[in-house]
Image: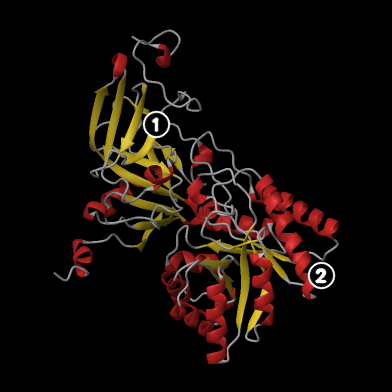
Amino acid sequence: MTHEAGWAHAPGALRGPSWLRTPGDVNALVPQLWSRTAHKQDGDLVVGGVPLADLVAEHNTPAYVLDEEDFRARARAFRDAFAGWDVYYAGKAFLCTAVARWVAEEGLHLDVCSAGELTVALRAGVDPCRIGYHGNNKSVAELRRAVAAGIGRIIVDSVVEIERLEMITADTGLAARVMLRVTAGVEAHTHEYIATAHEDQKFGLSITSGDAFEAVRRLQACEGIEMLGLHSHIGSQIFDASGFEVAARRVLALHARVADELGVVLPEMDLGGGFGIAYTTQDDPSEPAELAAEMSRIVEHECRALGVEQPRLSIEPGRAIVGPSVCTVYTVGTVKPVTLDAGAIRTYVSVDGGMSDNVRTALYDADYSCTLANRDSDAPATLARVVGKHCEAGDIVVRDEFLPADVAPGDLVAVPGTGAYCRSMASNYNHALRPPVIAVRDGVARVVVRRETEDDLLATDVG
């Protein structure tokens, strides 16, 4: 019998997090968590005009489902909101040949941070002049390739990298266009593993210690290096604009010092990315137009205060474009009610993927949502924990979510917001095969990254 005050007040009830509310309709989607074309139709989750049940019948599970229309719309929204800025899509969030082409077609630049990502970008035909190359430990071979390819900007991360570029440009006679990554001493309000502008971490050179200024001095003295400007990135999944305000103030102060003491007006400045998305109802991200207005206001104010001309600005959204454009669909394998203290019951819903296709819950304690994707249910909502199939107690996909109480083996469960860092960080843990990425648009599904096979798994095993 249902307790008159609701399920959470019944004897032995298991309470979820304070932000999670019992849904009025357990079958309904929360629109802000899903891509633009996602909707329910007779119980089936439809994305890009393709019912996921039909997609699964052809391609199996688990699978990443990429809403092409949504991705392109978000890319255009950043491009248009930040008109006059350069918008670099951060490929580390998710990159494949098709996505690199979409980025170029929508008028964005592309940021890469490894030789592999650069290979994909060049294979996709992205203009090298529109590519930025990040990384805190670029090898001599990687830098040689970037210089030879005519990469638009290399984001220098250390004095050692400056020495390598000096050698390469002297040897080849080619020029290198660079920005210097600096740490602004900002404590971003995010997980410590993805906060990247405080002093005690591996990226960039410190403004506070003076290392950044000395690096600029050295770069300006290098004949083969064209110094474009300063680069700052304060972290990821950030909603509070105050962090960007402090970072902009400190980076622009260094920009002004370079002009005053070295007589050099740097033409560009990059404020990085890290814009958050809604993974659950507790998240309230800003729209690109809001971000553009606020960040423009911050820069204009600081430039006026310092008496400097505003440099050409750039940003690097990744998650904010691709994150909401993807959902992951799984098949339920087992459902297990577990009795806890005081008679409370937690329902464990095990699916055919897990931390090999989404490690963020285990790595960052990230929260996700989910929905039953293949049918409507008249059963009451029950608090469930969706878990993977790997040999780890921390193999959790969705820590707390309401699902119909009759969820059963064979059902499909879809998790929204999995476009950023899920496929990019996927692994072969327990020798799992990485899922495919299937783009959907106008009722058509096409594979853009195929599912791994056992032959792929064994290809590098030479024993």
Give the image location of residue 358, x and y in percent.
Answer: 36, 48
Ranked by sequence position, the earlier of labels 1 and 2 is 2
Q: Quadrant of the N terminus?
A: top left
Give the image location of residue 398, x and y in percent.
Answer: 38, 37
In percent of the image, x 53 and y 91: which residue is there? 171
Task: Characterize the local packing of mark 1: few (<14), some (14-19) or many (20 or more) Cα atoms within 10 angstroms.
Answer: many
Reading the image, the residue beneath label 2 is 260
Task: Classify 158 as above or below 242.
Answer: below
Task: Classify 134 as above or below 278.
Answer: below
Quadrant housing residue 165: bottom right
Give the image location of residue 208, x and y in percent.
Answer: 67, 58
In percent of the image, x 48 and y 25: which residue is there? 21
User: Looking at this view, is 151 or 463 the one in front?
Assistant: 463
Color theme of the render: secondary structure
In percent of the image, x 67 and y 64: which residue is there? 210
Task: Classify 174 as above or below 89.
Answer: below
Q: Amino acid at mark 1?
A: Asp
Quadrant housing residue 115: bottom left
In percent of the image, x 52 and y 80: which residue is there? 164
Disc number lying in front (1 or 2): 2
Q: Amino acid at mark 2?
A: Asp
Q: Quadrant of the C terminus?
A: bottom left
443 on left or right of 282: left
109 on left or right of 411: right
Reading the image, the residue beneath label 1 is 400
295 on left or right of 130: right
Q: Which mark is residue 293?
A: none
User: Looking at this view, is 69 or 347 the one in front?
Assistant: 347
Q: Judging from the image, what secondary structure is the residue with disc 2 in? A: helix
Q: How many marks?
A: 2
Residue 266 visible in image: yes
